[in-house]
Amino acid sequence: MHKYAGTLILTLLLAVRLVAQDSLSLPEFNRERIQTTKAAMVVLGGWSVANIATGLVAMGQTSGEAKYFHQMNAIWNVVNLGIATAGYFGNRKLHPGSYNMQGSIKEQYKIEKIYLVNGALDVAYILGGLYAREYGKNQSGKEQDRWKGYGSSIILQGGFLLLYDVVNLTIHHRHGKALYRKFDGMQITFAPGQVAASLRF
């Protein structure tokens, strides 16, 4: 069995190389994924800048619960802006032509997993915001305003991020189908002493 392992691996590697040469260009596929991610970072950055600017202005013009609502919006989005900036410039450094089939699949799986995990965290943020508001009801004065204002802000930010992550996950998942279709035309057959891979065009 072991003596056929090398043949199997070599055959699969050659098959993957052939698949990469079909009508779907791997560099183009990866370029689209990178461009989509950069666009998403621009959207997140725009949301962050808008919230920071509005929050800083509004917290100086409001009081009570509203003041803390705007304050948390500004604080929260400083972090978002940092993530968006790092993500955008990080993707600018990527080269679409540097990924083979295995690398392309790995990156596709990675980006989908990131948005999926982030979506679960977004739900946790919303629940945390709801808890903060309920906790604030049992407080008084400034503490009540703080907890309820912060809670409302976290619910808003979590809701936006949930929508943001779901939309991006959907876009990347649909885009990834083009990559996985590369394997539709590949057939692998096994026979005593040999392994063969063929492609249907």
Image (tube, grey):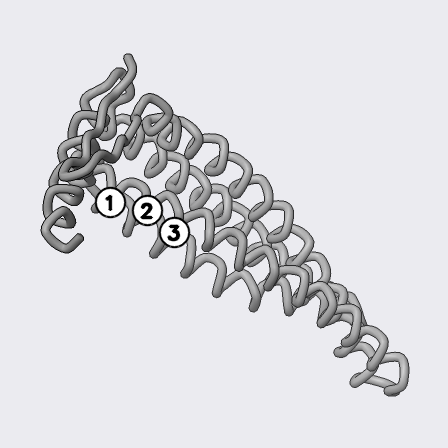
- Bin the neighbour count of mark 2 within 10 Å (Cα to Cα): few under 14, some 14-19, many 20 and up: some
Q: Are marks 2 and 1 in contact (CB under 8 Å)?
A: yes
| Whether residue 64 is visible | no
91 sits to left or right of 148: left
- Bin the neighbour count of mark 1 within 10 Å (Cα to Cα): few under 14, some 14-19, many 20 and up: few
Outermost residue, front side: 192
Task: Please give the count of numbered marks on the rendered protein.
Answer: 3
Q: Say what amino acid the circle numbered 2 marks.
A: Glu
Q: Residue at x 22, y 34 (%)?
A: 191
129 sits to left or right of 93: right
| Whether residue 86 is visible | yes
Residue 110 shows which numbered tag? 3
| Above-or-below relation of 113 to 193 | below
| Above-or-below relation of 152 to 137 | above
49 sits to left or right of 9: right
Q: Residue at x 48, y 65 (%)?
A: 79
Disc 1 target residue: 103
Q: Secondary structure at mark 3?
A: helix
Residue 107 shows which numbered tag? 2
- The image quadrant that residue 158 belongs to is bottom right
- Bin the neighbour count of mark 3 within 10 Å (Cα to Cα): few under 14, some 14-19, many 20 and up: few
Q: Are marks 3 and 2 in contact (CB under 8 Å)?
A: yes
